[in-house]
Amino acid sequence: MATKTKNKTKYSKKELDEFRKLIEQKLEKAYAEYEVFKGTISGEDDHGTNDTSPTFKVLEEGSEVLSKEENAQLAVRQKKFIQHLENAMLRIENGSYGICRVTGNLISKERLRAVPHATLSIDAKKAQ
């Protein structure tokens, strides 16, 4: 492959392996966080208020509903993030990883390290 980024049309296997490892690490962490959100929503992380006063219990239940709604939103966002990372892994496999879907140019390594699931270069993102 060409040595200069401007002339390159794809990242090398070695570079793709670096991104693959980064994405795998992010996926592992994202899955773990997603499971925490799901556990909180389903009540698996219930701290038990059966033996507390009725007033406290009512206040905590109201807070619990709000917390479950917030956690549900976070779980949805986390699932979307996981899907983006999995799609990035597919792009690595099919050889289209790191190529801007608008300009067709390579997305900078710095951007991909910060946002490994990016499909737009900085220029394309700014133009949106």
Image: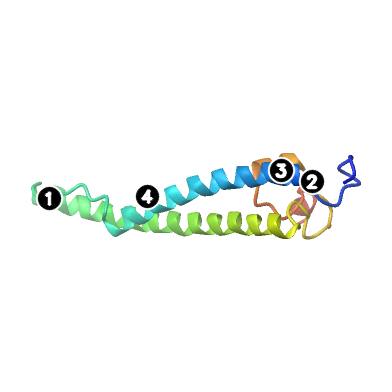
The mark that comes first in sequence, 4 or 1, is 4
Badge 3: few (under 14), some or many (20 or more) residues near its Cα, within 10 Å? some
Q: Position of residue 41 (x, y in %)?
A: 32, 57
The mark that comes first in sequence, 3 or 4, is 4
Q: Which residue is mark 4?
A: 36
At label 2, which amino acid type do we have?
A: Ser
Q: Which residue is mark 2?
A: 12
| Displayed quadrant of residue 58 | bottom left
Q: Which residue is mark 3?
A: 111
Q: Residue at 65% across / 52% down in the picture?
A: 117
Q: Which residue is mark 1?
A: 55
Q: Is residue 28 left or right of residue 67?
A: right
Q: Residue at 55% across / 43% down in the picture?
A: 25
The mark that comes first in sequence, 2 or 3, is 2
Q: Are marks 1 and 2 in contact (CB under 8 Å)?
A: no
Q: Position of residue 46 (x, y in %)?
A: 23, 51
Q: Is residue 81 left or right of residue 91?
A: left
Q: CA distance from mark 1 to mark 2?
A: 63 Å
For the residue labelled by badge 1, is the local secondary structure a helix, a strand or a loop?
helix
The mark that comes first in sequence, 1 or 2, is 2
| Displayed quadrant of residue 61 | bottom left
Q: Position of residue 114 (x, y in %)?
A: 65, 41
Q: CA distance from mark 2 to mark 4?
A: 36 Å
For the residue labelled by badge 2, is the local secondary structure a helix, a strand or a loop?
loop
Q: CA distance from mark 3 to mark 4?
A: 28 Å
For the residue labelled by badge 4, is the local secondary structure a helix, a strand or a loop?
helix
Hey, which residue is sitting farthest front in the picture?
Answer: 13
Please identify, in this view, whether the residue under mark 2 or under mark 3 is nearer the observer. 2
The mark that comes first in sequence, 2 or 4, is 2
Please identify, in this view, whether the residue under mark 4 or under mark 1 is nearer the observer. 4
At label 4, which amino acid type do we have?
A: Val
